[in-house]
Amino acid sequence: MLKTCGKRFLLSIVGATFPCLVVLFVAQLQQRSQVEVVPNGREVGMRSLQSFENLAESHNTQEPHLSQPDPQQQASNPEQGKGFSAYFTKLTRERREAEKTESNPQPATEKPHMEDITPNDIFIAVKTTKKFHQARLELLLDTWISRNVQQTYIFTDGEDEELKKRIGSHAINTNCSAAHSRQALSCKMAVEYDKYIESGKKWFCHVDDDNYVNMRTLVKLLSNYPHTQDIYIGKPSLDRPIEATERLGDNLMRPVNFWFATGGAGFCISHGLALKMSPWASGGHFMNTAEKIRLPDDCTIGYIIESVLGVKLIRSNQFHSHLENLQQVPKSELHKQVTLSYGMFENKRNAIIMNGAFPVEEDPSRFKSVHCLLYPDTPWCPSYVV
């Protein structure tokens, strides 16, 4: 009886032990396979750690908490423990580097210029009339033109020997009417365009005799655009495209609408675009084109560029005319403006507000004060401005 029970007990122990040995043997094989894969399976290991980190974050913990591996397990599997620790260290280091980058962003790099240009690459046309030679033109000649005589051409409607003494052949009598009509204005613009084409310069810029031009800022602005491409830059005076009627001949007409840069603030056209305008602007063609829409010179420029050639106006808030409230231009931003103006706005004196070198009574346009701010070494500027 006892022998029979002993045999049965022994058989049960053997039967239970054998499956356990088989399970342990299979587990050992799988463990060795993982140890061999970890050092070479870097991507798999990193995914495992990332999955573990995501699991930790789902439990609202700020840092993933990894329990220390069993010392006995490390002793039996030294390679596995070493590989796991290395990847954890790498993950921590990469996270610290990422946090450092976020807290200390790199400074933004300035947009490189499209091309290097100088004031000599720019043709500045100033439109005026003889009756304003002293009232307006003298101020410009004493301020910004005095530093840019070689780049500036004055287009007027009468002979002036004193003006020729100051700027020589850059004083151009257009022989156009002195009236402020669209025909007279277009006549002067036609001469401006032809003279610019003759010059071969990279840029054509038009301003009026009540504009101050900051050549430094103008050069910086135009340097951002290639002069060989189609560039038309300025500031509209309207908040919507102008609507006009284009006369096609034989009593045929069609409506057109387009944006234009107001001549009162100034505008610039690249050489490449100016050449394309030639069929509608060169010689007497500009006057004919202006008659087709019966609008002034700056509107006709916009019509040729936007409506005929399909080139869009590039708007720039660095151009200013007397048609806007100039008191909104802050003194701290004056050096960034391309043009300034003065005149009347809503029946009030319209000029920039600044505590400059001269009182308002002596300098109502504020152009002298602006000039001394930009060029304090000018001989007639008060010494304390330097």
Image (cartoon, helix red, strand yellow):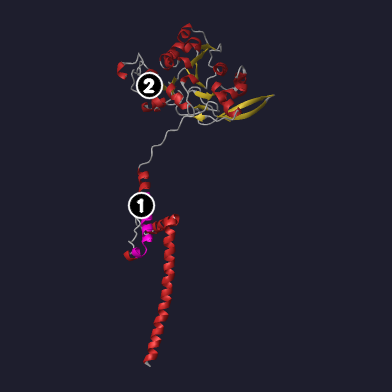
Q: Residue furthest left?
A: 384
Mark 2 secondary-structure assignment: helix
Point out residue 32 in the picture as x, y percentages from the top left corner: 42, 64
Q: Position of residue 10 (x, y in %)?
A: 39, 84
Q: Amino acid at mark 1?
A: Thr
* Residue 337 point in image, percent of width and height: 42, 25
- In the visual, does 237 lie left or right of 362? right
Q: x, y percentage for residue 318?
A: 44, 27
The residue under label 2 is which amino acid type? Leu
* Circle nearer the N terminus (2, 1): 1
Res 214 seen here: no
- Seen from the viewer's position, the closer of residues 229 and 260 is 229
Q: Residue at x 34, y 21 (%)?
A: 356
How many other residues sit within 10 Å of disc 2, few (<14), some (14-19) or many (≥20)? some
Q: Residue at x 40, y 78 (%)?
A: 17
Residue at mark 1: 92
List the residue tagged with mark 2.
374
Q: Is residue 21 visible?
A: yes
Q: Which residues are magenta?
A: 73-94
Q: Is residue 353 above or below residue 91?
A: above
The residue positioned farthest toward the right in the image shown? 250
Image quadrant where one finds the C terminus:
top left
| Residue 228 vs residue 196, the one in the foreground | 228
On residue 258, which mark appears?
none
The answer to which quarter of the image holds residue 142 is: top left
Residue 88 in magenta? yes
